[in-house]
Image (cartoon, rainbow, N blue to C red):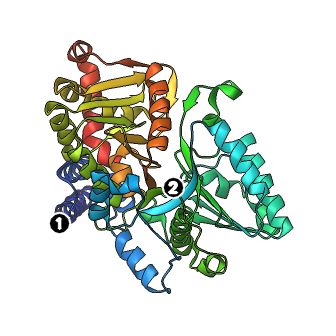
Amino acid sequence: MNVLRLFAEYFSLILSIALILVVLSGRKEARATFSWVLVIISFPYLGALLYLIFGNPRLKRLVDVKLKSRRNVSVKKYFDKMPEYKSSRLANLVETVTNLKPLLCYDLELIPSATDKYSKLAKDLLNAKHYILIEYYVFRQDETGDFFLKLLEYKAEQGVKVFFLYDGMGAIGITLKNYLKNLKMNGGKCAAFLSPLSYKSILRMNFRNHRKIVVVDGRVSYTGGINIGNEYIGDLIGSTKWADAHVRFSGDAVYAIEEIFAEDWYFATGEDITELFHKRHNRVGGDVNLHVIPSGPDQGSPLIYDTIFSTLSAAEKAIDIITPYLVPDQPIIQTLKNASKRGVKVRILLPGKNNHIFVAAAGRSYYEELVEAGVEIYETKNVMLHAKIIMVDGFWTTLGSANMDTRSFRLNFELNVVVYSKNFASDTTNLIYSYFEMANQIELQALQNKKFSNRIFEGVCRTLSPVL
């Protein structure tokens, strides 16, 4: 027994040293590196398993190999610059940083709630003639999910090509319950993105597809923060009130959304479906410019992070950040503090009652230093705020699936749009105003008088946030 115990101790030591060297040789930010080293030292065997699953840095190489094995997944895109885009210095900044061209769209609308989204989406799905692309992080097996699944089954039975992609972790219940059996029997195609039930992807399950995409016939698209499920309807079904936002638009920009879906579909299935799009695409133009910005761990430098960081740094008058989770890196925190100190009005709005306790606690650990720098922080009262919106200088607006946290910036596959429209900015301003009406401002004195136990808990959550 002594020999076995001695062997286990030596093996634990060697394993810990080897993994620590691997972690230190990577290019994670300092806090993430420290967190992983701490976990590995504290829990050698468990830490090793957690690192292999949640700290695995090999996804980019896997993506590169897979994407090189197929012909280019791309759809025809047209672009032109409208006057509102040309006059925006932030628009040119985003184009320079991302190397993405602005796309045209029309019938652009801000959707301020799940009930509005679901009613519009149901009509568009019913009107589908050729194909439906649908991709969600969360797709609940409840009344809302059942309704949309039945609708997809009906359209597939009519001969409409349905492609259904869901995240393996976020919607794991779909796989466990064989939920899509009838859709498949009716001709629909379904796939999980990195299913934890597959031995091929178990060590990459920490990379989540957090996107929310629907495209109908290349004619109309949806994206934003609203998944499919009862909880997003909130008070309508007697649960906690839920605040969220989405966008719907038509025009050339829809083709870029299709391209992102096609790449995700190819990654999950190995099937190239772009021929389906090419047959139907014509130049349709639009009257509003927007950037469609995908981001993920397959990118050397995540585009959404680069976009947000650059724009916050260039703000001159005001920054409004609406997010359910605030766990950014130190450069973002310092940028917000510096912006406030140079006279920019910075406001951050978060949910007072959060559905992720540890992430919320990590976020609250930043409050005091931000408020001391002049940043205004608000929390909603009895509302789960799930919208992800940033507005800069009252015009530049981004909305999508990305939260203001390390997971969204570094680990998740996300999708945001940046809109250059005074009308859209006005609608967004009104929505943001309605959010602030439901919130209380966090005062510096309350933060300074916080219980020591709360500080400890928040500090631990902040330290471990890269591995949460």
Which circle's residue, 2 or 1, is located before the other in the chain?
1
Q: Amino acid at mark 1?
A: Ser
Residue 366 at what x, y percent from top left? 25, 32
Residue 111 at what x, y percent from top left? 58, 41
Residue at the spot 53% in from the left edge and 76% down from the top edge: 75
Of the pair 266 and 200, the residue shown nearer to us:
266
Position above or below: 443 against 93: above
- Kind of element beneath mark 1: helix
Residue 278 at what x, y percent from top left? 61, 80
Mark number displayed over residue 101: none
Residue at the spot 59% in from the left edge and 78% down from the top edge: 274
In which quadrant is the C terminus drawn?
top left
Residue 338 seen: yes
User: Label 1: which residue?
Assistant: 25
User: Label 2: which residue?
Assistant: 211
Of the pair 276 and 211, the residue shown nearer to us:
276
